[in-house]
């Protein structure tokens, strides 16, 4: 039988450790990223230094060592743990005779291969072009040509030869324009969601922590609405690149809007975060964040830190947050378990989802108050709004109108103020 499954490209990893206590963690992430890009990681090298070499990133001795080992292992690609300057990449390619990819390009490639919706595709394309623009070098067309295309078929894909700076500049402008159009449509939908004053909850966290699984758990349990379709779950980095928004209707007439979005990883390229601002708008608008953390990840603390860093970069500081430690079923510990604003749970367990919903309810609706309202018999619309938007405890039809006993959150109290007696 002919085996025509293409062999994965072999990659060798290297990084300079500037005495960073998180260095091992970054190298582990780099391995995971390479695997996520379908590369076969055959080895790695690290260099301790006080600073990187300006022209070549690594020292010349290390470069020769890597060249020998990597060629011995039949590696074709060298992946570096940081974002490199165009000159460093060119010099390393010359010296090692390997294709050199930095951490940023690797992340961009993964995002490019995962983007499904128009908006995500445009956002990734924009970030890629912005990365490529300063890396174009007219005098090095041969090398540039080799560097075109995707990771798997470099050389065969689009060549940078024809793409001079000006065309890339034009492309960037065109994509920004198109993106504005797509974003505007999304913004109209978001505005509608904001208008009806339903609180908004956003799932955030490290990639692969279980955000989408948590969303599906809540949907299965609480939403029978049409269109409440499940979101995509997969054991891979950046399975989700878009934002999905669903309404979760709790049993007692309290609703909230839940969003699931792209996961985070450390050293996310700045351009990428910038390009994904529209996607992350839902996170910015949220009244409550649920930071989903994989409790079984040996680098759990760093993943929490990474999430905080990315949130800070998109300008989120004071939004209340529940930290939800997921995958408790793979630990020895009892779950679900609430401790302050923290939860230990398993997104795959019904009992856990119930407790998570309770915790969300507490956060969002704790300040609600029991009030009595009097609705004139002629104000049928107000009555139906109250039924839709608040928790009705009791209802009596009397000669002066409908007496309602309801539990109202502060914003609802304001909205229906003139009917409260
Ligand atoms: N054992 C276990 N696996 C889980 C749990 N939640 C999620 N997973 C798995 O973790 C992987 C990533 O889940 P996903 O929801 O796509 O993560 P996301 O990237 O944060 O959206 C998938 O293989 C899930 O099946 C859980 O509670 N327990
Ligand atoms: Mg996901």
Image: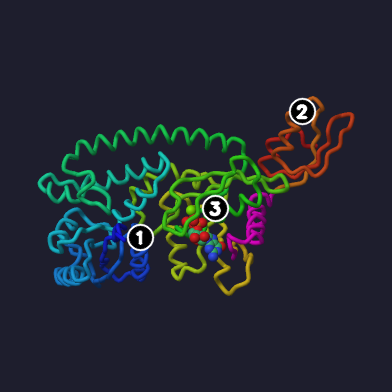
Beta carbon of the mark 1 residue lies under 8 A of ligand 1: no
Task: Give whichever of discs 3 and 1 has the lower sequence position.
Answer: 1
Q: Are marks 3 and 1 in contact (CB under 8 Å)?
A: no
Image position of 390 (left or right of 376): left
Q: Is residue 171 left or right of residue 204?
A: left
Disc 3 packing (10 Å; few <14; some 14–19; many ≥20): many
Q: Which residue is mark 1?
A: 33
Q: For the view shown, which residue lies furthest in the top direction?
A: 378
In three-dimensional space, the C-alpha distance between marks 2 and 3, rounded to whole angstroms, equals: 36 Å
Residue marked by disc 3: 289
Write down the residue under mark 2: 380
Q: Are marks 2 and 1 in contact (CB under 8 Å)?
A: no
Q: Is residue 122 visible?
A: yes
Mark 3 → mark 1, Cα distance in angstroms: 26 Å
Residue 145 is situated, as x and y percent measured from the top left of the image, at 16, 47
Q: Residue at 74% across / 37% down in the picture? A: 387
Query: Disc 2 and disc 1: Cα gap in Å?
Result: 57 Å
- Quarter occupied by residue 171: top left
Q: Position of residue 398 (x, y in %)?
A: 89, 32
Which of disc 3 and disc 2 is earlier in sequence?
3
Label 1 Cα crowd, 10 Å radius (few <14 / some 14-19 / many 20+) = many
Q: Identify the secondary structure beneath mark 3.
A: strand
Give the residues in magenta.
Answer: 344-367
Secondary structure mostly seen in magenta is helix
x and y percentages locating residue 272 in the rendered image: 35, 48
């Amino acid at each position: 039988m002919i085996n025509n499954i293409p062999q994965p490209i072999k990659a060798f990893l290297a990084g300079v450790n500037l005495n960073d206590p998180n260095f091992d963690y970054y190298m582990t992430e780099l391995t995971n990223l390479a695997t996520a890009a379908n590369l076969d990681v055959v080895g790695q090298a690290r260099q301790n230094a006080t600073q990187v070499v300006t022209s070549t990133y690594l020292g010349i001795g290390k470069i020769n060592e890597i060249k020998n080992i990597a060629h011995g292992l039949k590696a074709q690609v060298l992946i570096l743990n940081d974002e490199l300057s165009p000159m460093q990449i060119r010099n390393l390619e010359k010296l090692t005779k390997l294709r050199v990819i930095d951490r940023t390009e690797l992340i961009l490639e993964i995002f490019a291969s995962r983007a499904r919706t128009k908006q995500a595709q445009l956002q990734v394309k924009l970030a890629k072009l912005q990365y490529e623009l300063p890396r174009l070098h007219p005098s090095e067309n041969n090398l540039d040509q080799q560097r075109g295309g995707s990771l798997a078929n470099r050389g065969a894909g689009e060549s940078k030869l024809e793409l001079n700076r000006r065309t890339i500049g034009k492309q960037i402008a065109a994509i920004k324009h198109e993106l504005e159009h797509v974003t505007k449509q999304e913004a109209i939908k978001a505005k509608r969601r904001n208008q009806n004053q339903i609180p908004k909850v956003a799932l955030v966290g490290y990639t692969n922590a279980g955000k989408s699984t948590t969303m599906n758990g809540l949907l299965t349990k609480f939403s029978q609405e049409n269109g409440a379709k499940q979101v995509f779950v997969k054991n891979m980095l950046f399975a989700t690149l878009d934002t999905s928004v669903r309404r979760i209707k709790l049993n007692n007439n309290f609703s909230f809007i839940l969003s699931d979005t792209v996961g985070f990883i450390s050293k996310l390229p700045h351009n990428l975060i910038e390009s994904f601002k529209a996607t992350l708008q839902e996170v910015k608008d949220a009244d409550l964040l649920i930071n989903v953390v994989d409790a079984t990840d040996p680098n759990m603390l760093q993943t929490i830190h990474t999430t905080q860093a990315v949130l800070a970069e998109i300008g989120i500081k004071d939004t209340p947050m529940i930290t939800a430690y997921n995958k408790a079923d793979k630990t020895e510990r009892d779950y679900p378990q609430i401790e302050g604003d923290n939860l230990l749970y398993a997104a795959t367990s019904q009992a856990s989802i119930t407790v998570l919903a309770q915790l969300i309810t507490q956060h969002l609706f704790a300040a609600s108050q029991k009030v009595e309202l009097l609705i004139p018999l002629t104000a049928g619309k107000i009555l139906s709004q109250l039924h839709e938007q608040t928790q009705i405890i009791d209802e009596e039809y009397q000669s002066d109108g409908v007496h309602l006993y309801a539990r109202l959150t502060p914003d609802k109290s304001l909205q229906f103020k003139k009917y409260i007696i």
